[in-house]
Image: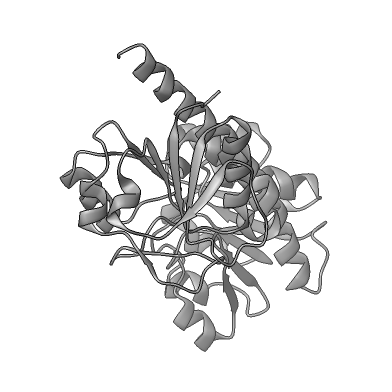
Amino acid sequence: MLTGTQVAFIGGDARTLEIIQRLTELDATVTLIGFDNLKQTFSGATHAELTEEAFADVDAVLLPVVGTDDEGKIDGVFTSKELRLTDACLARLPKHAKVYAGMAKPYLKSLCAKHDIALVELLERDDVAIYNSIPTAEGAVLLAIQHTDITIHGSTVVVVGFGRTGMTLARTFQGLGAKVLVGVRKDDHFARAFEMGFQPFHTAQLQQHVGAADILFNTVPSLIVTSKVIAAMQPRAIIIDLASKPGGTDFRFAERRGVKALLAPGLPGIVAPKTAGRIIASVVSQLIMEDSAKRGNGV
């Protein structure tokens, strides 16, 4: 239980509601900032404005999956007010407090470092990323069906990147009957992809392996689907970029070339917000309980 633990939520979307529900069930004292347009109520949760005083005595701050932008702005779909995390706000946090976000841009990292506040990037955790890869893969299937006029079965799919998302993605499309090529950086990933029945290649040779692709999925958050790669693709092919903004595709050249290219980050929150929220809620609640136990033991 989290009786006596003070948690502040600032902004968020449908996923955030699942986290709020979980923490209130665990008897945490929850403050909601940026939820003034939310019609749903939570037992034990109170609403507050984004002020410096709201951060006093808080044990954990929960930000949206995207954290803040480069100027400290926080997205909140349940408010029309501007939410901005400032230096003065973090200055009021107790030193034992932690800030949780899916990912953190330099602004948030710098602010937490300045005030010696621990920052937890949830999407960097293997468990969260692997769980999230499930709704991501399902969303990718949805996009592939919506934006092609062929069946996945019998198609040629290229997956660039064989990390936590890429592996689930490749296995999902293989299960649907596609021929799956996987672009990897590491030799051990090459071996694993081969063992799993995919056709692996090193990403440095991406241009040489996209000629027959019907669908190319990119999971690498840096420019890798370059103009040269796109020029080697069939005009009827489609690119679906799942990496965080701005993605890893030269979208301008794709448009000039007539190749359809979609940037689709954050699919879990779009296609399955309840599941995505429950994934984060399970991990966050466990982390906060562990911290609470340590404080109770004087650690």
Of 4 and 170, the residue lying toward us? 4
Q: Is residue 185 above or below residue 216?
A: above
Q: Position of residue 260 (x, y in %)?
A: 61, 78
Q: Is residue 204 above or below residue 114?
A: below
- The structure residue drawn at horizontal position 47% and vertical position 44%, both measured from the top left corner, is 123
Hey, which residue is sitting farthest top in the picture? 297
Coloration mode? one colour
- The structure residue drawn at horizontal position 48% and vertical position 62%, both measured from the top left corner, is 34
Q: Is residue 177 above or below residue 96?
A: below
Quarter that holds the C terminus? top left
Of 118 and 128, the residue lying toward us? 118
Of 49 and 170, the residue lying toward us? 49
- The structure residue drawn at horizontal position 40% and vertical position 71%, both measured from the top left corner, is 82
Q: Position of residue 280 (x, y in %)?
A: 56, 41
Q: Is residue 183 above or below residue 144?
A: above
Q: Position of residue 144 (x, y in %)?
A: 72, 65
Of 146 and 8, the residue lying toward us? 8
Hey, which residue is sitting farthest bottom in the picture? 256
Q: Is residue 49 visible?
A: yes
Q: Position of residue 38 (x, y in %)?
A: 61, 62
Quarter that holds the N terminus? top right
Count of numbered labels shown in the rendering: 0
Q: Is residue 200 visible?
A: no
